[in-house]
Image (cartoon, rainbow, N blue to C red):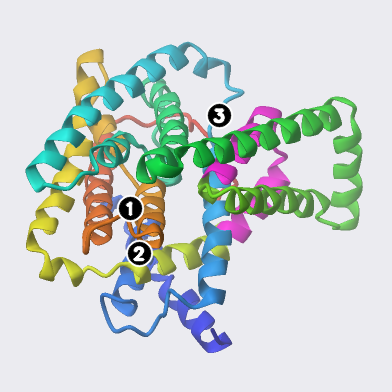
Amino acid sequence: MSFVELSVICLVALLGPLLALPRGWHLPVVLGELLAGIALGRTGTGYFDPSDPTFSFLADAGFALVMFVAGSHVPVRNPALRPALRSGALRAVTVGIVATGLGYLLAQAFDVHHAPLYAVLMASSSAALILPIVDSLGLGGEQVLGLLPQIAIADAACIVALPLVIDPHHAGRAALGAVAVLAASAVVFVVLRHLERSGIRGRVHDVSEDRSFAVELRVQLTVLFLLAGLAVRMHVSIMLAGFAFGLLVAAIGEPRRLAKQLFAVTEGFLGPVFFVWLGATLQLRDLGSHPRLILLGVCLGLGATVAHLVVRASGQPVPLGMLAAAQLGVPVAAATVGEQLGVLVPGEASALMLGALVSIAIAVLGGSLAARRGMVGTTTMDPAGG
């Protein structure tokens, strides 16, 4: 990769803010970045080579940061969130049960023996997509706050379950890797909490802010990339490392200055690089050679929506159910790991991503409907702004 190619990536990534600019459209920024990658990647002109080691490495770093920021924006310290934990867990379990049934139906219908994988995909909720939509649309109130535990629980559970179902022959290794990453995250949590309670973190923060050292940013990036490196070494997705670290930082508390710095690094550079790379990896032309897999992808996206709308019986508004159906990290990891392991049938990876794109379109519509129905209020997160 050259500097010219990197500048083109940053340039086309501006399509994201441009599409999101009209407030009436209620479109997330990542949509434009994905479309730019699709247009200039494998599906389109082929200008971007997603297999380029530098490009893919920067994308991995961006993915880790996107998942970290998503986890750090879950308001785990908000007392109002605690009563919603039980209902959120029940809704996530209900969605999982329905998704399991739909996964086996789709596997039988398309004669592809990946029912557990399809179940995990349809049960997942992408915090990396949903939380920015909630923030950008100003959604808030009790019902939106009650949605957040459901998303966090579903996302975390599916992140852990994915390596177990996509490569069952190495399920033990994947489980050990997940435990190792979570254990390392727990150690980091204990250390950071001690530094916070002892006042050391506060003193470092004051000196860093006064002298413009950005020490906290350097430390958090160091820890994040160490956890991501452990995840890679233990053969689990880096999204587990990023999301887990983000949750524990949210539990301890993140200074607003640090949040702004992380927001700048992620949303200004590495995040767009990741989403453009992701669009570039998609080979939607493969679906033309396997037309039945187009239907599989559509069914996966619609199935995820149906599974999440079932909890309407618990009182959750339909627009929030549509919003909760958004998929991103889990399908990305499934398509990437599945192709690396050779466990997917030809064109299946593209079908998984098509399903994710369908779910994203439905989630965008759900977010727009929620905004139009007046589900706005006090923001549920404490983003850096931008």
Label 3 or label 1, whichever lies nearer to me, is: 3
Q: In terms of secondary structure, where does tag 3 sit?
A: loop
Q: Quadrant of residue 15?
A: bottom left
Magenta span includes 243: yes
Magenta stretch prevailing secondary structure: helix
| Category of crowding for the residue at label 2, using alpha-carbon neighbours closer than 10 angstroms: few (below 14), some (14–19), many (at least 20) | many
Q: Which residues are magenta?
A: 240-266
Residue 34's tag is 2
Please report the residue visible at 38 percent of the width from the left and 14 percent of the height from the top: 87
Please report the residue visible at 49 percent of the width from the left and 30 percent of the height from the top: 380
Residue 23's tag is 1
Which sits earlier in the primary sequence, circle 3 or circle 2? 2
Query: If the image is split into quadrants, where does the C terminus sit?
Result: bottom right
Amino acid residing under circle 2: Leu
Residue 266 relative to residue 45: left or right: right
Which sits earlier in the primary sequence, circle 1 or circle 2? 1
Q: Is residue 162 above or below residue 224?
A: above
Which sits earlier in the primary sequence, circle 3 or circle 1? 1
Residue 75's tag is 3
Q: Where in the figure is residue 354, as x and y percent of width and height?
A: 23, 56
Quick check: can you spot residue 302? yes
Magenta span includes 377: no
